[in-house]
């Protein structure tokens, strides 16, 4: 062979190897291998069979898993191709290259007309081996004359098969990476959360597709300047967010913030951003984290809160209505009698002569009916005040944590930080869990409302417990507006309230519950800001009842 022909063949082989090595998909790899093999060998027909799972099976199987699906490329096109049964052991198992001769009926890829030509054929079946596994097969067919599968051609086919096997690993890695990326994108879309990295020096950000959607940023903007991000933050939330970011960057502390995002069409989302600081590829400090769209959760929490408020209002109205109905029903009869007796008394006194005896009887009747009305009112008051407590062992800290979880949405909306300092060595106490939790709920809500208008200082609720002389003390300290010194003990009076639209029953009910537990409830002004409400109850109710007996 002349030098020019050898150079041409080398160029052709080099081009084929480059084409195969660039492929990153199974089907593209099979196409490139078949095209290169047919061009170089001059064979008329060929097929490449690849296994995505990295393990080729000898025959079709209905239960064949999708992750092991087979890719078939052939010239001419075929729906199915199988390695001849007699070659299964040699090609697929022993991984041998097989070169064989036969008649035209031995063509696997020929049509019926070609099979009738009774020509002598030669075919080459070559396994593609990757990490000791047969991952594919290269099959070529040609007429026996002229001879095309020369030793030089076989060496070239082996080289192409080796390169294809190496490229198979790259295709596997790319497919795994593509699948992982697809899962990440789908997972972020389902979870409504996007990932980001923010360079604290350049103020540029890189973010995932879902992050772009949440913030309503044009996907063509990459990286994202900080000004573009600022334009999406609600103007009322931007100052606090900027301050929180600056403090986190200065301290390199974990970042967490909830704020609102306004889309270009006016739609508003509630989001939560969290992150931690890390050194980026350029050596700059970067904030890496996640932004989550919590709009649906916030709407659901608000709907739940509204429903709870409406239910409480309806319950109060129902209780007041029931009490009013009882009063009307029970007191109306003696009142009617009082009026009737008074009118009769006046009539006896207006007679001439005066009916003194009858007038005296009417006055006596008035006194009797008045006493009866008083007894009815006292009975209804006792009914409203008294309740049967159900004492049992209660872990106070768990009961408080349940109420804090219930109030989590209200605390977050009010931007209140809760700090707890519980005496972890405290054993269970004997109390009515439901009634005690009602006290905790009322005192915590009072603190939230006391801090509603606070500005310029942190809003914090500190809850602490301690065990002192056989009594459990639980204190609620807020940074709110504090207590008016003129109020004093009036805070706990029935129907006394400082809230607009309040009923004045909350603190009164709290004191009744604590008193029923043999304890006491008091309030005091904090040294700096706000107020502290504390209650103390005995550890064991049984001991208290024994002492009282």
Image (tube, helix red, strand yellow):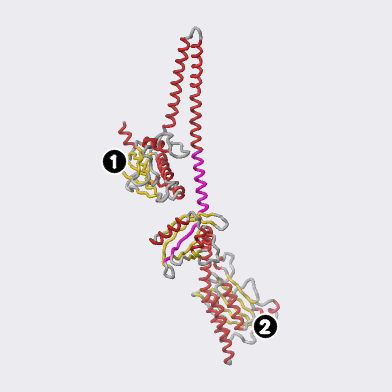
Residue 334 at x, y percent in the picture: 48, 21
Along the viewing direction, whichever of 410 and 424 lies nearer the viewer? 410
Assign a secondary structure to mark 1: loop
Q: Which residue is mark 2?
A: 119
Measure the C-alpha gap from mark 1 to mark 2: 109 Å
Is residue 457 depicted above or below 317 in this figure?
A: below
Q: Nearer the viewer, mark 1 or mark 2?
A: 1
Quadrant of image for the C terminus: top left
Q: Is residue 177 left or right of residue 255?
A: right
Is the residue marked by circle 2 packed among few (<14), some (14-19), or many (20+) residues within 10 Å? some
Q: Is residue 51 left or right of residue 144?
A: left
Q: Please tell me in which quadrant of the rendered image residue 150 appears.
A: bottom right
Could you tell which of marks 1 and 2 lies nearer the N-terminus?
2
Q: Residue at x 49, y 75 (%)?
A: 131
Is the residue marked by circle 1 packed among few (<14), some (14-19), or many (20+) residues within 10 Å? few
Q: Is residue 282 left or right of residue 66?
A: left
Assign a secondary structure to mark 2: loop
The residue range painted magenta reads: 285-313
Q: Main secondary structure of the magenta part?
A: helix
Task: Point out the residue furthest to the top here.
Answer: 353
Quadrant of image for the N terminus: bottom right
Q: Which residue is mark 1?
A: 469
């Amino acid at each position: 062979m002349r030098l020019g022909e050898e150079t041409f063949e080398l160029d052709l082989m080099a081009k084929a190897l480059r084409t195969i090595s660039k492929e990153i998909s199974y089907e593209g790899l099979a196409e490139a291998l078949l095209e290169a093999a047919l061009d170089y060998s001059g064979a008329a027909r060929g097929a490449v069979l690849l296994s995505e799972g990295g393990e080729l099976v000898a025959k079709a199987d209905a239960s064949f898993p999708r992750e092991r699906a087979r890719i078939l490329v052939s010239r001419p096109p075929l729906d199915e191709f199988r390695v001849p049964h007699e070659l299964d052991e040699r090609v697929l198992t022993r991984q041998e290259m097989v070169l064989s001769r036969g008649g035209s009926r031995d063509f696997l890829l020929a049509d019926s007309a070609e099979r009738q030509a009774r020509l002598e054929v030669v075919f080459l079946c070559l396994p593609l081996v990757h990490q000791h596994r047969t991952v594919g097969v290269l099959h070529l067919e040609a007429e026996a004359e002229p001879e095309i599968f020369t030793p030089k051609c076989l060496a070239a086919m082996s080289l192409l098969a080796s390169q294809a096997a190496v490229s198979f690993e790259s295709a596997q890695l790319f497919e795994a990476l593509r699948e992982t990326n697809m899962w990440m994108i789908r997972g972020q879309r389902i979870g409504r959360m996007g990932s980001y990295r923010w360079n604290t020096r350049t103020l540029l950000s890189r973010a995932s597709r879902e992050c772009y959607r949440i913030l309503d940023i044009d996907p063509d903007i990459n990286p994202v300047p900080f000004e573009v991000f600022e334009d999406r933050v609600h103007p009322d939330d931007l100052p606090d967010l900027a301050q929180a970011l600056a403090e986190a960057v200065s301290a390199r502390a974990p970042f967490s913030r909830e704020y609102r995002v306004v889309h270009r069409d006016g739609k508003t989302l509630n989001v939560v951003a969290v992150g931690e600081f890390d050194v980026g590829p350029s050596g700059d400090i970067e904030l890496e984290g996640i932004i989550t769209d919590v709009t649906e959760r916030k709407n659901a929490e608000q709907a739940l809160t509204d429903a709870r408020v409406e239910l409480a209002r309806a319950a109060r109205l129902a209780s007041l209505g029931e009490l009013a109905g009882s009063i009307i029903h029970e007191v109306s009869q003696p009142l009617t009698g009082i009026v009737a007796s008074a009118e009769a008394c006046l009539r006896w006194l207006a007679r001439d002569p005066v009916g003194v005896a009858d007038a005296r009887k009417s006055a006596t009747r008035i006194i009797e009916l008045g006493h009866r009305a008083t007894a009815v009112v006292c009975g209804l008051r006792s009914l409203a005040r008294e309740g049967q407590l159900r004492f049992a062992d209660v872990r106070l800290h768990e009961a408080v944590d349940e109420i804090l979880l219930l109030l989590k949405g209200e605390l977050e909306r009010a931007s209140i930080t809760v700090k707890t300092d519980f005496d972890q060595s405290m054993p269970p106490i004997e109390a009515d869990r439901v009634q005690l939790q009602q006290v905790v709920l009322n005192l915590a809500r009072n603190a939230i409302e006391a801090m509603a208008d606070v500005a310029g200082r942190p809003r914090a609720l500190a809850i602490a417990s301690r065990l002192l002389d056989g009594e459990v003390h639980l204190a609620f300290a807020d940074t709110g507006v504090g207590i008016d010194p003129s109020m004093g003990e009036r805070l706990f009076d029935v129907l006394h309230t400082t809230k607009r639209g309040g009923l004045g029953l909350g603190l009164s009910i709290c004191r009744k519950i604590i008193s029923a537990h043999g304890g006491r409830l008091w309030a005091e002004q904090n040294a700096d800001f706000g107020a502290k409400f504390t209650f103390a109850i005995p550890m064991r109710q049984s001991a208290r009842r024994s002492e009282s007996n």
